[in-house]
Image: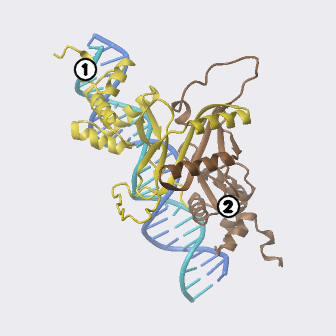
Chain colours: A brown, B yellow, C blue, D cyan
Amino acid sequence: MVAAGDAMESRIGRMCIERGLKMTGQRRVIARVLSEAEDHPDVEELYRRAATLDARISVATVYRTVRLLEEKGILERRDFGGGRARYEATEEGDHYHLIDVDTGKVVEFEDAEHTALMQRIAERLGFDLVSHRLELFARRKPAPAAADGKAGQKTAAESRNGPRR
Amino acid sequence: MVAAGDAMESRIGRMCIERGLKMTGQRRVIARVLSEAEDHPDVEELYRRAATLDARISVATVYRTVRLLEEKGILERRDFGGGRARYEATEEGDHYHLIDVDTGKVVEFEDAEHTALMQRIAERLGFDLVSHRLELFARRKPAPAAADGKAGQKTAAESRNGPRR
DNA sequence: CTAGCTGCAAACCTTTTGCATGCGC
DNA sequence: GCGCATGCAAAAGGTTTGCAGCTAG
C-alpha cells in the first residue's frame, strides 16, 4: 500500500533497482545489511546478519548476491588475508585500509598523494594503471614513555592470518 | 666427497642449513627450484618443477616446506589474486609488484618515496607500521605505431579472484 | 638412535554449481 | 507465464593433517 516505490528501499537496494535487478525478499535483506554495515564483513558475517532479519536465506544466496553486486560495481571485494573475502559498498574516491595486527580492526584513510604516485609509477614502467591495492599492517603506537620492542619484522609476521582462526 | 660442505647447495639450501634445518633430498630439490626461480611460482608450479628434478616428492611436502621457509623468513608469500598463494625469496629492501592484467605477468619495482610515505601515513594515524602490501594492476600501454602483438598464454586464466572492474 | 620428514589420502574451508521449485515483473 | 532467483546438498579448488614408515644428524 505504500505509494512511494523505493522509499523503503535501503541505499544499496535502490542502486540495485537502478541497475534493473529483480528485487527478491532475500536481496532486499542483504542489500539492507550491506547498507547498514560500517565495517568490512565477510560472507559468513553477512549471512549471519541477514539471517537475523529473515531466516529463509541461504549462504549460497549471499554468495550469489555479493558476486552479482560486485559485477554491477555496487560492492567491492577486499582481501585482508585470512582466507575469506570481505565486502564493502563502493564509495567515491580512493580510500585505503590499515589493519591493526593485534585486533584485526580496520581503519580507513585517504591519501591523494599516494594515488597520484601510483599513477606515475605505472606510467614510468610503461603501463596504464587499471587499479591498485594498498594495505598497511600496523600496531597501535605505545605510550611515548615506555618503548616496547617487537615491531621489527617484515611481512612474514602477520601474513599468515590475523587474530582470527 | 666434495670438501666444501655446502658448495653444492643452492643459495636457499645454504640459508636452510644456516638456520639449522634438516636437509632432506626433497628439501634440497625444493630449495634449488626456489633459488633458480626468477618469477613468483605457486605451490603447484613449484611441485611441477621439483618433480622434474626428482619424482619422489609430494605436493604435501612442497606445502610443508614452503610454509616452514616462510616462518623462517627465507620466503615470502604473495597473493596476487587467483586463489593460490605465490612465493618468492626474501630480498633486501622493499620492492613491489605490478601485475599485467592481460597476461598475468608480474613486474617488480622499487620506490623509496612510497615506502617513506607509508611510514608517515601510519604515523599520522597513530600506528607503528609493521608491514604493508602494495600491488598495481595495469595494462601495457599501447605502442603508438609499433606492432608489438605478443600475448601470453600460460597464465591467462588468472582473473578468478583479482580486483576486477 | 631419535626427532623430525615424507607420502598418501582423508579432512578442511571457502566458494561454486546442478537441479527442482518458487516468485518478481 | 517466463525466466531469473533460491535452497539444498554435492562438488570443486586450494591447503592442511593424521598416521605409519623412513632418514638425517
Residue B55 seen anywhere in this rendered image of the structure: no
- Eye-nearest disc, 2 or 1: 1
Residue B7 marker: 1
Q: Are marks 2 and 1 on the same chain?
A: no
On-image quarter of the N terminus of chain B = top left
Compared across the picture, whether A17 is left or right of B140 comes to right
Seen at 32% across and 25% down, the residue is B13
Which amino acid, by three-letter code, is at mark 1? Ala
Disc 2 versus disc 1: distance between alpha carbons? 61 Å
Residue A86 in the image, given as x and y percentages of width and height: 61, 50
Seen at 34% across and 35% down, the residue is B34
Which amino acid, by three-letter code, is at mark 2? Ile
**Which of these two is toward me, D16 or B118?**
B118
| Picture layout, residue B77 above or below residue A65 | above
- Label 1 secondary element: helix
Chain label for disc 1: B
Mark 1 and mark 2 in contact (Cβ < 8 Å)?
no
Location of mark 2 (residue): A30
- Give the residue furthest to the front: B145
Chain label for disc 2: A
